[in-house]
């Protein structure tokens, strides 16, 4: 009787084995979006923390250079630099002008490698030199959120760059000299979890160094002077966030920084203006209090 029971159980074991092999095969070959269920709510959080809406939506302008406000994420916002003017691209799900025809791998490559779907290198006006350290789960969640946004058919505007910077092929040399893939996402085991979270937010998602770190003559961030200010940043001089700036945030408490990132109010009762006000309204103010505290911990530890 015992032998009969064993023989009858063999088909069951074979079925279970076949199912296991099938599941592992699907998990191995399926795209990440299939294997891992995306958290769209976290994707929205990453979207705001990373400032995607700020750059990829033209806010419009009054006065001499007046232009109407653009559709959300449809691009067209001018970014004036010493090398010329860049115009941000359409990142809506539109199949012709946006990312509607992209795969997740196209998106991942763009964010962390700075390459277009055809592998052409992007200019570093797109902050992939900071985004390169973004976590895979955050990338997947961000992709899911952006795919769910309204589509707009605005065509992308060509950059207006000075010679020789209008020669995109030169970017291959720039990348060889200055781009270090994944570098910004490295954690420091000698630091607390709170410090590391703050470092991730500042260095990667919020990409604060893109404005607050000085650049060399080729437009690459000088990591030896991380967050030490930029005399020719967007909208003018960008302040030094390190203790070397005796009149800067070195005089602020961690709570002062948290308040500033939430409301834009300084300890003196003034309020942030210009592009920083936009960053606060649409990015840092959307963060949790815990994340703003982590940023404060990281900034107060700068040397």
Image (cartoon, grey):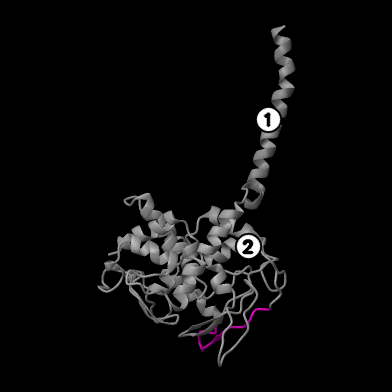
Q: Which residue is mark 1?
A: 17
Q: Is residue 62 left or right of residue 295?
A: right
In the drawing, does residue 117 fall left or right of residue 11?
left
Residue 222 versus residue 7 in the image, above or below: below
Q: Which mark is residue 146?
A: 2
Question: Which span is picked out in magenta?
Answer: 155-167
Q: Quadrant of the C terminus?
A: bottom left
Residue 288 placement (x, y as % from top left): 47, 56
Numbered disc total: 2
Residue 100 occupies quadrant:
bottom right
Tell me the crowding category of disc 2: few under 14, some 14 to 19, or many 20 or more residues within 10 angstroms, Cα based.
many
Residue 214 shows in this picture? yes
Evaluate whether residue 31 shows in this view.
Answer: no
Assess whether residue 65 is covered by the magenta stretch: no
Mark toward the start of the polypeptide (2 vs 1)? 1
**Residue 164 located within the stretch drawn in magenta:** yes
**Residue 264, position in %: x, y?**
42, 69
Front residue of 35 and 242: 242
Residue extending farthest bottom:
64
Where does residue 213 sit, x and y in percent of width and height?
Answer: 38, 73
Residue 63 picture quarter: bottom right
Q: Is residue 45 above or below residue 75?
A: above
Residue 30 position within the rendered picture, expressed as x and y whole percent measured from the top left: 67, 49
Indicate the secondary structure of the residue bearing disc 2: helix
């Amino acid at each position: 009787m015992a032998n009969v029971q064993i023989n009858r159980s063999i088909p069951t074991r074979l079925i279970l084995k076949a199912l296991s092999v099938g599941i592992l095969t699907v998990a191995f070959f399926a795209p990440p979006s299939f294997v891992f269920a995306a958290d769209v709510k976290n994707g929205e959080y990453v979207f705001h923390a990373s400032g995607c809406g700020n750059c990829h939506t033209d806010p419009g302008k009054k006065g001499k250079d007046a232009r109407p406000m653009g559709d959300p994420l449809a691009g067209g916002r001018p970014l004036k630099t010493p090398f010329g003017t860049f115009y941000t691209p359409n990142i809506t799900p539109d199949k012709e002008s946006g990312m509607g025809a992209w795969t997740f791998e196209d998106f991942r490559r763009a964010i962390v490698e700075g390459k277009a779907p055809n592998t052409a290198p992007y200019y570093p006006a797109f902050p992939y030199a900071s985004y390169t350290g973004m976590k895979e789960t955050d990338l997947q969640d961000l992709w899911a959120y952006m795919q769910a946004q309204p589509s707009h058919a605005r065509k992308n505007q060509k950059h207006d760059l000075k010679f020789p910077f209008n020669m995109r092929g030169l970017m291959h040399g720039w990348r060889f000299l200055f781009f270090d893939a994944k570098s910004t996402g490295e954690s420091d085991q000698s630091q607390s979890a709170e410090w590391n979270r703050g470092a991730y937010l500042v260095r990667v998602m919020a990409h604060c160094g893109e404005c607050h770190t000085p650049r060399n003559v080729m437009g690459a961030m000088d990591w030896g002077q991380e967050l030490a200010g930029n005399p020719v940043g967007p909208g003018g001089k960008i302040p030094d966030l390190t203790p070397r700036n005796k009149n800067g945030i070195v005089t602020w408490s961690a709570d002062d920084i948290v308040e500033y990132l939430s409301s834009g109010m300084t300890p003196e009762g003034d309020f942030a203006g210009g592009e920083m006000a936009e960053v606060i309204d649409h990015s840092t103010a959307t963060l949790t209090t815990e994340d703003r505290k982590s940023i404060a911990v990281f900034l107060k530890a700068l040397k």
